[in-house]
Amino acid sequence: MTATTTTITPKWHTTAEVAAMLGFGLSKTKMLVATGEIRSVKIGRNRRILPTWVDEYVNQCAKAAIEERAA
């Protein structure tokens, strides 16, 4: 009998998880969420961030850096 391993991919990230992914501190990440630079949704007392929203933020930063170098 072989064991089956199921990998569960999270649908949401916490601000702490996003901070770790981006290499930012928790307070900086919370500030980015508060200002709307990283989109989030409030569920109860907690903020949750979709993986695509993290990607959006990273892509916006990369685009801004490319535009800055071109100027």
Image (cartoon, rainbow, N blue to C red):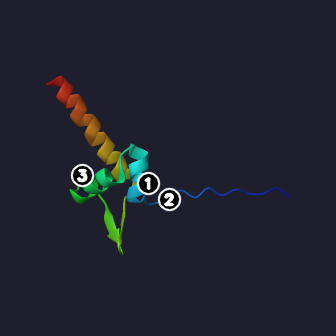
Residue under label 3? 37
Q: Residues within 10 Å of mark 2 (few under 14, many from 20)?
A: few
Q: Give the CA distance from mark 3 to mark 2.
A: 22 Å
Compared across the picture, whether 64 is left or right of 54 comes to left
* Quadrant of the rendered image containing residue 5: bottom right
- Give me the disc on residue 10: 2
Tell me where residue 6 appears, x and y as whole percent. 66, 58
Q: Residues within 10 Å of mark 1 (few under 14, many from 20)?
A: some
Counting residues from the start of the chain, the first of labels 2 and 1 encountered is 2
- Give me the disc on residue 17: 1
Front residue of 63/36: it is 36
Which amino acid, mark 1?
A: Glu
Q: Give the CA distance from mark 2 to mark 1.
A: 11 Å
Residue that appears at 43% across and 58% down: 13
State if disc 1 and disc 2 touch (CB < 8 Å).
Answer: yes
Compared across the picture, whether 19 is left or right of 30 comes to right
The residue tagged with tag 2: helix, strand or loop? loop
State if disc 1 and disc 3 touch (CB < 8 Å).
Answer: no
Front residue of 28/11: it is 28
Counting residues from the start of the chain, the first of labels 3 and 2 encountered is 2
Tell me where residue 67 appears, x and y as whole percent. 19, 30
Tell me where residue 32 appears, x and y as whole percent. 26, 53
Looking at the image, is 7 positioned above or below residue 62? below
Q: Residues within 10 Å of mark 3 (few under 14, many from 20)?
A: some
Q: Give the CA distance from mark 3 to mark 1.
A: 16 Å
Front residue of 56/33: it is 33
Q: Residue furthest bottom?
A: 44
In which quadrant is the N terminus drawn? bottom right
Which amino acid, mark 2?
A: Pro
In which quadrant is the C terminus drawn? top left
